[in-house]
Amino acid sequence: AIARALLLNPRLLILDDSTSSVDLVTEYKIQKALDRLMKGRTSFVIAQRISTVVNADQILVLDKGRLVAKGQHEELLETSEIYADIYHSQLVGDVEVDESALTQGEAQ
């Protein structure tokens, strides 16, 4: 679905939990490709995984359908308890992944 959307070269791109069902390595590769493809276009990324949005220009945090915080990743870690809790539950406890192992397939 992502590839089909990008073939149309839309000015507005909406991705709804597009990497939720893939493993970490695949998510990393998709995210790297999307980072390049989203340049120059307005993009809305709806995600449950923090790793999907950490590089976003603006992150909106919703709780029970209400906007409770907005900002960039580093700012939200400091100012939003909900965002920080999600971040720590998803990423900090994970085993560190060697980025060279993730990018190994890109060089081939």
Image (cartoon, helix red, strand yellow):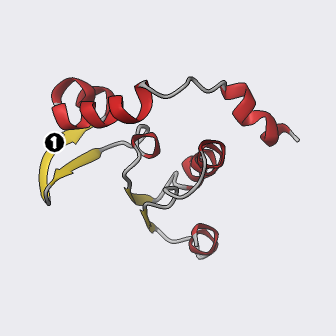
Residue at x-position 46% and y-position 68%? 11
Residue 82 location (% of width, % of height)? 19, 37
Residue at x-position 49% and y-position 54%? 40
Picture quarter with the N terminus: bottom right
Along the line of sight, the residue nearer the viewer: 57 or 40: 57
Picture quarter with the C terminus: top right
Amino acid at pointer 1: Ala
Tell me where residue 81 sits by quadrant: top left
Q: Position of 25 compared to 19: left or right? A: right
Label 1 sits on residue: 69
Along the line of sight, the residue nearer the viewer: 6 or 65: 65
Residue 31 location (% of width, % of height)? 57, 47
Q: Dot 1 surroundings within 10 Å: few (below 14), some, or many (20 or more)?
A: some
Element assignment for label 1: strand
Residue at x-position 41% and y-position 37%? 54
Residue at x-position 49% and y-position 56%? 20
Residue 91 location (% of width, % of height)? 43, 31
Number of marks present in the image shown: 1
Along the line of sight, the residue nearer the viewer: 17 or 2: 17
Residue 39 vertical placement versus 5 (above, below): above
